[in-house]
Amino acid sequence: MAEWIDLIDPSEEELRKHLPPHTHEVALDVLLEPPVHDDEPRPRIVSHGDYVFGVLLVPVVVKKEGRLYYQEVEFIATRERLITVSKSQEGEEPFDPKPAKEACRVHDEVGMYLYHLVDEVAERFLDLVDDLDDEVDDLEDLVATESVPVLGARLRKLRAGVRSVRRTLAPTRDAVHKVIDDRVELDGAELFPREVEIAFGDAYEKLLRAFEALESTRDALGGVRDYLQGKVAVDQNEVMKRLTITASLLLVPTFIVGLYGQNFRKIPELHWGFGYWWSWGWIIATTVGQLVFYRWKRWL
């Protein structure tokens, strides 16, 4: 009967107890390497003769902190055994394959065990894309009320997150497709019989659906960016309109003051006793007239 062995941050000695005797040194190095980056190493599923080696990254969203990280899990699958190695980052929980294990039946083959593991990863990506869509909707609602610097920072962070998910989701989808195309198999034995390949097709469809939804999310983010740029342009136009109105209101009084401040003897109204108030009357009247006109034109 097939067995599933799950290891968390194992030592080399513990790892060698369960690995096939001819495990390639490259695969062993990957299994022992600590996680270096959130979206590294690149997900893949490859055949190494008498075993299949794979790397998967499981997305985890911490909603309270508004961040995303990946749980790295590698596996080696033989005809009799599935060995998964979960790696933990500092301060983060390692991947728990318990839901995938519980979905397995007693007489399932190793290939079906591996399907349930991949299907769990696919479900996580679907949930992640749904969370990203919710973030985009919230961001779009805030465009009308939130300040531009705050919105710009959130938009850049969200776009970086979408790019990170795309870099991980695309190779995961391609790796699963290799199993369906029968490009990954054991030498001299069958790890993925027809019914297992059909099951992998279901996981592939979930990953494909998640990828298509992620592309829609990217388009929606582009729409939010355009909306934000339009809002910035409108705000700038409002500022320019107010500055123009202010300059116009000051222009006529400046002209009147300049007119009565001309420095020559024959200036009209030079000896009027009420000349000062006459000039102020023109200033007030023209200013009020401009305000009434701008209000009538709905510029104010």
Image: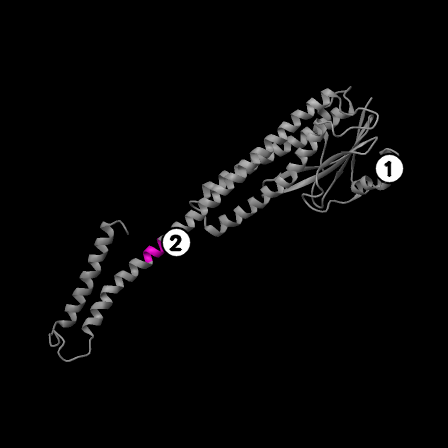
The majority secondary structure of the magenta stretch comes to helix
Q: Which residue is mark 2?
A: 236
Compared to residue 137, the image places residue 282 above or below, namely below
Magenta-colored span? 238-242
* Amino acid at the residue labelled 1: Arg
**Dot 2: few (<14), some (14–19), or many (≥20) neighbours within 10 Å?**
few
Give residue 196's position: percent from left, percent from top. Answer: 72, 22
Q: Which mark is residue 170?
A: none
- Front one among 144 and 172: 172
Whether 239 is among the magenta residues is yes
Whether 141 is among the magenta residues is no
Give residue 65's position: percent from left, percent from top. Answer: 59, 44
Q: Nearer the viewer, mark 2 or mark 1?
A: 2
Compared to residue 36, the image places residue 75 above or below, namely above
- Dot 2 or dot 1: first in sequence order is 1
Task: Locate residue 66 relative to residue 95 in the image: left or right.
Answer: left
Task: Locate residue 206 relative to residue 231 in the image: left or right.
Answer: right
* Amino acid at the residue labelled 2: Gln
Q: Estimate the spatial distance between the alpha carbons at disc 2 and disc 1, rounded to whole Å.
A: 66 Å
The quadrant where residue 243 appears: bottom left
Identify the residue at horizontal 59%, vertical 30% (top origin): 209
Task: Locate residue 170 relative to residue 252 in the image: left or right.
Answer: right
Q: Which mark is residue 16?
A: 1
Mark 2 residue element: helix
* Residue reaching furthest to the right: 21
